[in-house]
């Protein structure tokens, strides 16, 4: 018999200590060089687009450049510099607005894209800028912060741009650089204020930028503030006006607009549904005011003087829009669609004057945009926690900013 204990007993080897496995989440909001390059290219294209296209609005004159045998209007160098100034101001507002959202999302560790700038070679050269939230926001506090940061930041920039514009206003004679404005200049020199209406020769068109409560207040503080049908000659005033109005559009209390995020966080899903559907109905009233006269012109030879056929067409279109906007909720449609038609009729036949400027059809666009793109109701949030007092104050101030910056007839012509 062996005396070696190893022959009779098994001694297991000690287990190796296992290291804990750490699963790391993919880093959020760290765009790579290719992504950054793509967004920078979009910004540059938008800057070029706004700089060039806006010269047709803020410029003094157009030159004709012949390419082949085709004459093409082209702005001179001085106008291009004015366009560059306007583009710099407008994109400053847009950039601060969008990065307000972006940095709030980064703070709350919500996956988000850099701003996508949207160039378009008409109007003022851009449709604005957007960011994409790439994951569901599951808490009202986060939803509120991300929704409110953009419009508040952009609003502050707009106010700064306006104040600089009003503080550096030139004398009235400045308008003569944009053609014959002798009537306006002489009227100002005689009365110390600009006339209420432009003096138009046959074939001339004046663009009216809609008054807003806040713009009206600021302009009343400066004696040399030009009328709203002349502000396209003042890049700071025009960019500031667009900043206020774009802020108001984003603060509409519907769907996934900034105002929708804010109001949903303030009052919850059930109350927001009521407010959003009522507000959307009001927007359809404004759209009807634009649409019915336009449709009447299209079908004039088939219509009567009251516009019965135009009303029938608009009613059908409106029904289809309400079906989509209210997700075929028939009781709501039956209650609010007649209100929309009655509101439109009251304005067109009772309130509207014969000399009212022609509308720009913006509310028709926004009715379709809300119903089919941003939606009327806000999607539910998993955790509907009550906001802090500070957030509530900021939220209701944001709703006040919406009221102060909105214009019911933002762009018209006469």
Image: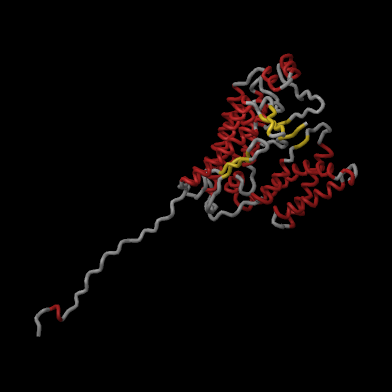
Q: Using the rendered image of the protein, determine whether residue 393 is visible from the camera's viewpoint.
A: no
* In this picture, residue 207 sits left or right of residue 150: right
Instruction: Give the number of marks.
Output: 0
Q: How is the structure coloured here?
A: secondary structure
Looking at the rendered image, the quarter that the C terminus falls into is top right
Where, by quadrant of the figure, is residue 63 drawn? top right
Image x and y of residue 289, in percent: 78, 41
Q: Is residue 266 above or below residue 237?
A: below
Image x and y of residue 152, in percent: 56, 37
Q: Is residue 296 above or below residue 243?
A: below
Q: Using the rendered image of the protein, determine whether residue 407 is visible from the camera's viewpoint.
A: yes
Image x and y of residue 262, in percent: 58, 45
Which residue is rendered at x = 79% and y = 25% of the image?
Answer: 200
Which residue is rendered at x = 62% and y = 31% of the image?
Answer: 239
122 and 228: which one is in front?
A: 122
* In this picture, residue 23 sits left or right of residue 272: left
Extreme residue toward the bottom, this view: 1
Q: Is residue 298 above or below residue 203?
A: below
Which residue is rendered at x = 80% and y = 33% of the image?
Answer: 356
Extreme residue toward the top, this view: 190
Where, by quadrant of the figure, is residue 81 drawn? top right
Extreme residue toward the front, this view: 68
Image x and y of residue 1, in percent: 9, 85
18 and 298: which one is in front?
A: 298
251 and 274: which one is in front?
A: 251
151 and 111: which one is in front?
A: 111
């Amino acid at each position: 018999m062996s005396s070696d204990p190893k022959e009779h007993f098994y001694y297991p080897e000690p287990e190796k200590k296992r290291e804990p496995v750490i699963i790391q989440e993919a880093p959020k909001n760290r765009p790579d060089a290719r992504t950054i390059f793509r967004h920078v290219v979009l910004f540059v294209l938008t800057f070029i687009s706004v700089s060039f296209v806006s010269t047709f609005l803020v410029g003094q004159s157009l030159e004709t450049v012949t390419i082949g045998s085709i004459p093409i209007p082209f702005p001179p160098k001085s106008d291009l510099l004015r366009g560059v100034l306007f583009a710099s101001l407008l994109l400053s507002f847009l950039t601060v607005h969008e990065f307000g959202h972006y940095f709030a999302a980064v703070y709350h560790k919500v996956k988000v894209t850099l701003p996508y700038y949207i160039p378009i070679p008409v109007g003022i050269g851009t449709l604005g800028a957007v960011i994409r939230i790439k994951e569901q926001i599951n808490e009202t506090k986060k939803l509120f912060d991300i929704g409110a940061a953009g419009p508040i930041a952009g609003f502050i920039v707009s106010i700064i741009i306006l104040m600089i514009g009003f503080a550096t206003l030139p004398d009235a004679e400045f308008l003569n650089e944009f053609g014959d404005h002798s009537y306006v200049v002489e009227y100002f020199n005689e009365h110390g204020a600009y006339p209420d209406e432009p003096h138009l020769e046959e074939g001339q068109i004046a663009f009216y930028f809609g008054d807003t409560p806040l713009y009206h207040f600021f302009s009343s503080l400066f004696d040399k503030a030009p009328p709203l049908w002349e502000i396209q000659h003042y890049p700071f005033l025009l960019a500031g006006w667009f900043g206020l109005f774009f802020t108001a559009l984003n603060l509409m209390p519907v769907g996934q607009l900034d105002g929708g995020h804010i109001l949903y966080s303030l009052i919850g899903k059930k109350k927001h549904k009521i407010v959003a559907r009522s507000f959307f109905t009001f927007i359809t009233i404004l759209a009807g005011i634009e649409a019915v006269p336009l449709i009447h012109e299209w079908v004039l030879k088939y219509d009567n003087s009251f516009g019965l056929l135009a009303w029938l067409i608009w009613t059908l279109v409106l029904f289809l829009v309400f079906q989509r906007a209210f997700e075929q909720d028939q009781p709501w449609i039956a209650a609010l669609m007649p209100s929309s038609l009655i509101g439109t009729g009251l304005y067109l036949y009772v309130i509207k004057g014969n000399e009212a400027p022609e509308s720009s059809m913006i509310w028709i666009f926004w009715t379709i945009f809300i119903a089919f793109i941003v939606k009327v109701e806000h999607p539910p949030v998993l955790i509907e926690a009550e906001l802090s007092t500070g957030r509530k104050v900021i939220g209701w101030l944001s709703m006040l900013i919406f009221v102060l910056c909105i214009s019911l007839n933002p762009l018209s012509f006469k």
